Amino acid sequence: MKRLAVIVFVTACGNRSPEPSPSTDPILEPLAMLASSSPERSTRSAPGFIGVLAPRSSADIVAPFTSRIVGLTAKLGERVEAGHVLGRLDDRPLREELAIARASLRAARAEAAQAEVGRRAAQNVLERERRAFQNHIVAEAHVAAAEFDERKAAIDVTRSVAAVDEQRARIAKLEAKLHDTALIAPLAGKVALHYVREGEYVIEGQPIVRLISSDELFVKFAIPADQAGTLATGAEIDVILEAQQLRTRAVVRHVAPELDPVAQMILADADLLDAPAGLQSGMVCRILR
């Protein structure tokens, strides 16, 4: 009986299908929600496929160095042009670091000059020892010792020159960052998100502002697996935005050749034709063939 119970338990566990993990892409969340619902229920509730409007392009403006946000001049939802100043970072920590780097460069140059003096002195000693050896004044061991000192002095010069080059590169990098205290929009679009608020500290590489090209939206939608092959590239579709009571047409641009591992559906996208005014990224729509 115990063996039979174990077999029944293992069989039940083995037949349990794993639940799909949620989508990490916020644009695809409605598609993942549809995939987790019953296919029969979604077919009966409304015809077609569920979709969502997405921006054609987007960009995250990140912190070029660790500092504090002293101002976010572009408000949420504001339309900006490429090159527009979105905000500014406090450049005082960077200027302090730059002053330290310049002081380190001066010290490295002084060490390099001292190392060069030591190398020349070692060369002079080596030449003197070689002449003395040729005149049978000193033993060959003295020449070998002088050669060792000369090689060591040459290595010191190489090391000190490398230290100078390192400090120069550091200064060049800091000076380049200093020009990036103003956060510049890389594209024309709309401010979609502020990741931080004014006065907060950000670390280098941390996103600060997100831009989207709101005037260039397209449609992402999901096709159930049992309806694969019903739409092809170039096909025209109806796009229904029920909440906004809007309807428009679109042309299928791409259909994925395989199931999405998260949504367990075939993902596709389409270009809008004569898109009506008032559309925004993230709006959920329904696709009709």
Image: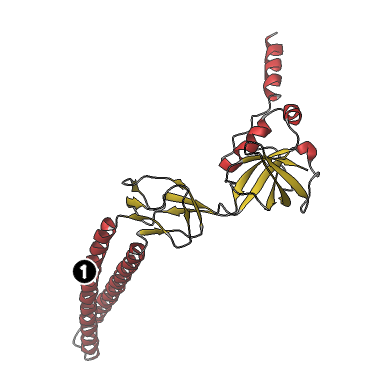
Mark 1, Cα crowd under 10 Å, few <14 / some 14-19 / many 20+, is some
Residue under numbered circle 1: 107
Q: Quadrant of the C terminus?
A: top right
Nearer to the camera, 10 or 258: 258
Please indicate, yes or no, whether residue 270 appears anywhere in the rendered image.
yes
> How far across and down, in percent of the image, does residue 111 sit?
22, 71
Q: Quadrant of residue 123?
A: bottom left
> At x 23% / y 89%, what residue is drawn?
131
Please name whichever residue, 167 or 111, is drawn nearer the observer in this view of the structure.
167
Horizontal side of 74 relative to 45 (left or right) equals left
Circle 1: residue type = Ala
**Where in the figure is residue 117, as x and y percent of width and height?**
20, 79
Residue for point 46% across, 51% down: 78
Residue 37, placed above or below residue 238: above
> Which is more toward the observer, 160 or 32?
32
Position of 250 with respect to 199 (left or right) is: right
Say which of 40 and 17 sits in front.
40
